[in-house]
Image: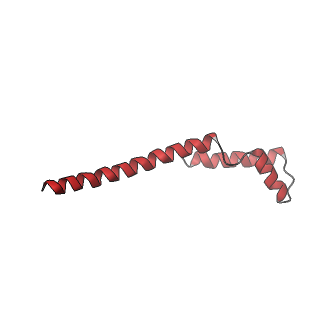
């Protein structure tokens, strides 16, 4: 009976470790992406120019707000 308890405790500890590791990694990545966004205004301006649009500052600001709003909404 002692071996069963050891195996059961090991499985429970493994599951708790996996769940805890997932949430810690998720929190770390959300903070990292918030501090270092994957796209900035210059990249957005270049992208719009490549698509044949004339990027105005108003359009760029509007698109950046939309992207940041999506990141905040996912929290």
Q: Position of residue 22 (x, y in %)?
A: 44, 50
Residue shown at 23% from the left, 56% from the top:
7
Which residue extends farthest bottom?
51
62 is higher (above) or lower (below) than 7: above
29 to the left or right of 5? right
* x and y percentages locating residue 58 in the rendered image: 81, 45
**Which of 44 and 7 lies nearest the eye of the viewer?**
7
> Which residue is drawn at the image coordinates 75% and 47% (left, top)?
62
Q: Outermost residue toward the top?
A: 35
- The residue shown at (58%, 42%) is 32
Q: Is residue 45 left or right of residue 74?
A: right
Residue shown at the point (82%, 60%) measured from the top left: 51
Q: Position of residue 35 (x, y in %)?
A: 62, 39
Q: How many marks?
A: 0
Give the image quarter of residue 47.
Answer: bottom right
Could you tell whether 74 is left or right of 59 in the image?
Answer: left
Q: Residue furthest front?
A: 3
In depth, the one of 7 and 41 nearer the eye is: 7
Quadrant in the picture for the N terminus:
bottom left
How are the residues colored?
A: secondary structure
Question: Can you name the residue that lies furthest to the left here?
Answer: 1
């Amino acid at each position: 009976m002692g071996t069963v308890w050891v195996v059961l405790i090991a499985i429970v500890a493994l599951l708790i470790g996996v769940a805890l590791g997932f949430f810690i990694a998720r929190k770390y990545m959300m903070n990292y992406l918030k501090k270092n966004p994957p796209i900035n205004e210059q990249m957005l301006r270049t992208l719009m120019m490549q698509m044949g649009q004339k990027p105005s500052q108003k359009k760029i600001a509007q698109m950046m707000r939309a992207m940041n709003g999506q990141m905040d909404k996912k929290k």
